[in-house]
Image: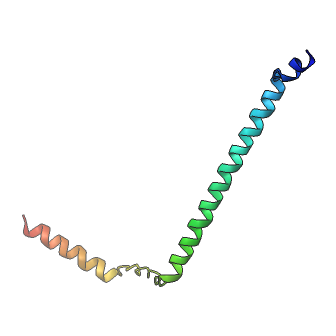
């Protein structure tokens, strides 16, 4: 009879179920983090290799801001006034 008791499966307590769930959850999270880190390293290596093969682009030159002097402003205003008067 004593052998029957040892064969019977023991019931898990709520605490042991929680521990099992926590352990499995942590293992899954760690596995996902390892996969994510491996992918990041692989993509970084590919990007660096691609950057090494491509020439570095020249920095874009900013266009100089052209400001009008007083003479140019007066000239453009008089041209506008002439156009408006010619339409009348």
Q: In percent of the image, x 46 and y 84: which residue is there? A: 58
The quadrant of the picture occupied by the N terminus is top right
Q: Is residue 25 left or right of residue 54?
A: right
Name the image quarter holding residue 7. top right
Q: In percent of the image, x 37 and y 80: which residue is there? A: 66
Q: Position of residue 41 (x, y in %)?
A: 62, 65
Q: How is the image coloured?
A: rainbow
Tally of marks: 0
The answer to which of 9 and 51 lies nearer the viewer is 9
Q: In percent of the image, x 78 and y 28: which residue is there? A: 17
Q: Is residue 26 left or right of residue 66?
A: right
Up-down relation of residue 76 to residue 39 (above or below) = below
Q: Is residue 44 left or right of residue 20?
A: left
Q: Residue furthest right?
A: 2
Q: Residue furthest top?
A: 1
Q: In percent of the image, x 54 and y 71: which residue is there? A: 46
The quadrant of the picture occupied by the C terminus is bottom left
Q: Position of residue 71 (x, y in %)?
A: 30, 83
Q: Position of residue 6 (x, y in %)?
A: 88, 23
């Amino acid at each position: 009879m004593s052998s029957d008791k040892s064969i019977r499966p023991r019931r898990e307590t709520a605490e042991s179920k929680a521990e099992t769930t926590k352990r499995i959850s942590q293992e899954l999270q760690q596995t996902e983090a390892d996969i994510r880190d491996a992918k990041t390293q692989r993509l970084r290596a590919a990007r660096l290799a691609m950057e090494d093969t491509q020439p570095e682009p020249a920095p874009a030159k900013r266009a100089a801001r052209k400001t009008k002097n007083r003479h140019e402003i007066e000239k453009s205003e008089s041209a506008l006034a002439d156009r408006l008067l010619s339409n009348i």
